[in-house]
Image (cartoon, rainbow, N blue to C red):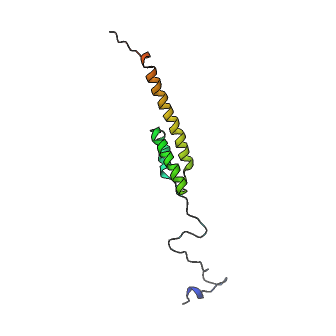
Amino acid sequence: MTTPQQQPTGPDAPYAATPMAQPGYGPPGYAPAPRWNVLSIVALISAFFIPLLAVVLGWVSVRQIARTGEQGKPLAIIALVLGGLGCLAWIAFWVAIIAGGGSFSYSYSA
């Protein structure tokens, strides 16, 4: 029986010698995939339901991405824009309700 160092090589070898992969490591030449910032995903989803929360989570996730180098900065920026527009829409809605509150009069006559 031969040891791995004494294996025959060449066209008449029973099998080609392949390098052993190190346990716990990926294939050589590949960098680990960058992680996604989960908070930026949550901020984008919350932009459609709770705009103020989207603005807060968007700012926090942009800061985290700058610190850690994770992916998701475009998602956080989109959440900031949509959240800001949603907040402006809510403010405009309440200003219209308060300012035009006297013009909505209902009369019930039986």
**Residue 76 position in % (x across, y down):** 53, 46
- Seen at 50% across and 35% down, the residue is 86
Quarter the N terminus occupies:
bottom right
Q: Quadrant of the C terminus?
A: top left
Foreground of the two, 66 or 31: 66
- Number of numbered tags placed on the structure image: 0
Q: Is residue 49 above or below residue 4?
A: above
> Between 53 and 72, which is closer to the camera in this rendering?
53
Quick one: which residue is furthest to the top in this view? 110
Q: Is residue 72 left or right of residue 94?
A: right
Q: Report whether 12 appears left or right of 63.
A: right
The quarter of the displayed image where residue 33 is located:
bottom right
Residue 34 sits above or below residue 51 on the image: below
Residue at 55% of width from left, 58% of height from top?
34
Relative to 62, does residue 95 appear above or below in the rendering? above
Identity of the residue furthest to the left in this view: 110
Q: Residue 65, position in %: x, y?
A: 53, 53
x 44%, y 16%: residue: 103
- Residue 49 image position (x, y, % from top left): 45, 38
Q: Work out which residue is located at the far bottom of the displayed protein and give it.
A: 1
Residue at coordinates 54% horizontally, 47% vertically from top-left? 75
> What x and y, as percent, mark residue 55?
49, 42
Q: Which of the 4 image quadrants contains residue 108?
A: top left
